[in-house]
Image: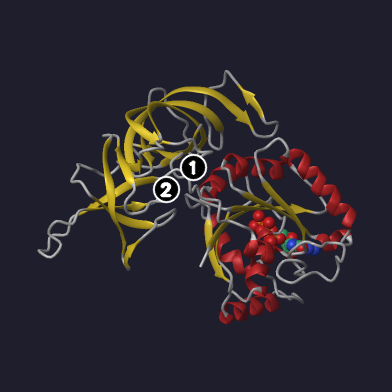
Amino acid sequence: MEILRFTTAGSVDDGKSTLIGRLLYDSKSIFEDQIAAVKASSERKGLANIDLSLLTDGLKAEREQGITIDVAYRYFTTPKRKFIIADTPGHIQYTRNMVTGASTANLALILVDARNGVVEQTCRHSYIASLLEIPHLVVCINKMDLVDYSEEVFNRISEQFNEFASKLVVNDIRYIPISALHGDNVVDRSKNMDWYQGGTLLNTLETIHIGSDENHIDARFPVQTIIRPHSDEHHDYRGYAGRVAGGIFRPGDKVVVLPSGLSSTIRSIDTFTGSINEAFPPMSVSMTLEDDIDISRGDMIVKENNQPQMEQDIDIMICWLNARGPQPGAKYTIRHTSRETRAVIKDVVYKMDINTLQRVENDAELKMNDIARVRLRTMQRLIFDSYRRNRNTGSLVLIDENTNETVAAGMIV
Ligand SMILES: Nc1nc2c(ncn2[C@@H]2O[C@H](COP(=O)(O)OP(=O)(O)OP(=O)(O)O)[C@@H](O)[C@H]2O)c(=O)[nH]1
């Protein structure tokens, strides 16, 4: 079954918890005992309706303890798709959390309070979603019940958002008028907004086309592990295991191993359940080649006629995630595909002011949540594509060698 990953963003009190609770409740994705518990505590609080935000409040408590990464993952399934929600809180650490939750997302769900319209947070979240090249944006205009389910308010906010979004790179934006509290257009079609002809939120999540979200053109296979079983039966088996990061591989394909440049032909592609004729992202497989060549972890198998770049000097857009900014000359471990190497930050080219979308030059000091363009020099060559071309081979993280913390996420320009 297809999996859709999405992230949620909105300012504090826009209704994210209520919306996710509603989505799980109306799609019957939560267990009866959880519902019973929420009903009981709603009654205890003297509420007439059950308070759906209580379903996600357990997670809030965790957040308030200040755990390192404030992203809570929730899972639900309908007959059509599986869903993974990366739920990020609306408070000030937006960038860091969104980057963490959104790097693999197909879709970003942006919540707007119908009474307030597009606010600063909406713009920041949308900018980050576009920076991360999240392919689909769904803007839910919530609390429609508080504006008399007005079509005019909905249109005004949609236009306001559209105008801002025209400055971003987002290909697919949809707008849905909802009331998370009353359930309008979340799972069930609203009886209060006949003027709205589009799908409900769940319907949109179930049907949005995500088949082209992965790059199926540039064949990229970063090798994670070399498999050499020691039993007699498999004496000469040597497989290269990893996750397909782009394109389509088939037995018989002429391939090149990078960085060595040695070439061979794919003999077989194997999975736990047997051999297959085709491998594409994000499948995890093991390949065997016709020739016995030297391959190690971090190498990349690609096709002869379509090769990635290999460089040591790399420009990236970076999101700084750590409380401590980079010290001059500090070395970092870079994790990129299945490869690890060291790098130094040579230069901060500019920082980005997310509110105005202007570049700020002459300010090289990176602070938490900053977004900047920086130049890296790596010890070994990286084998990469631009992030725009391939999110798998174009993204990397920087790790502090002393504390072992992830201090930044980067997207190769
Ligand atoms: N009238 C109305 N109230 C809503 C709606 N959705 C949410 N609310 C209310 O708005 C308030 C905030 O909702 P939450 O779901 O806690 O908001 P949140 O965005 O998750 O807040 P944080 O988790 O603090 O970021 C609550 O009092 C909700 O009952 C809606 O569609 N209509």
Indicate the quadrant where residue 230 lies. bottom left
Name the residue at the top extreme: 362
Task: Say if mark 1 contacts mark 2, CB within 8 Å.
Answer: yes
| Residue 86 visible in the shown view | no
Indicate the quadrant where residue 383 lies. top left
The residues bearing labels 1 and 2 have C-alpha atoms spaced at a distance of: 8 Å
Indicate the quadrant where residue 309 lies. top left
Task: Residue at 44% x, 47% y: name it.
Answer: 246
Task: Residue at 74% x, 72% y: name it.
Answer: 188
Q: Callout 1: 10 Å neighbours few (<14), some, many (20+)?
A: many
Q: Callout 2: 10 Å neighbours few (<14), some, many (20+)?
A: many
Instruction: Tell me the kind of residue under disc 1.
Output: Asn
Residue situated in front as seen by the camera: 23 or 134: 134
If you read the primary sequence from the N terminus, does the residue marked by circle 1 or circle 2 appear first? Answer: 2
Task: Residue at 59% x, 20% y: name it.
Answer: 361
Q: In the rendering, at what x and y percent does residue 143 appear?
A: 79, 60
Task: Residue at 32% x, 43% y: name it.
Answer: 255
Numbered label tally? 2
Image: 158 above or below 60: above
Residue pointed to by mark 1: 390
| Residue 225 visible in the shown view | yes
* Label 2 CB sits under 8 Å from any ligand 1 atom: no
Checking the image for residue 245, the label placed there is 2
Checking the image for residue 214, the label placed there is none
In the displayed structure image, the side of residue 63 where residue 242 appears, left or right: left
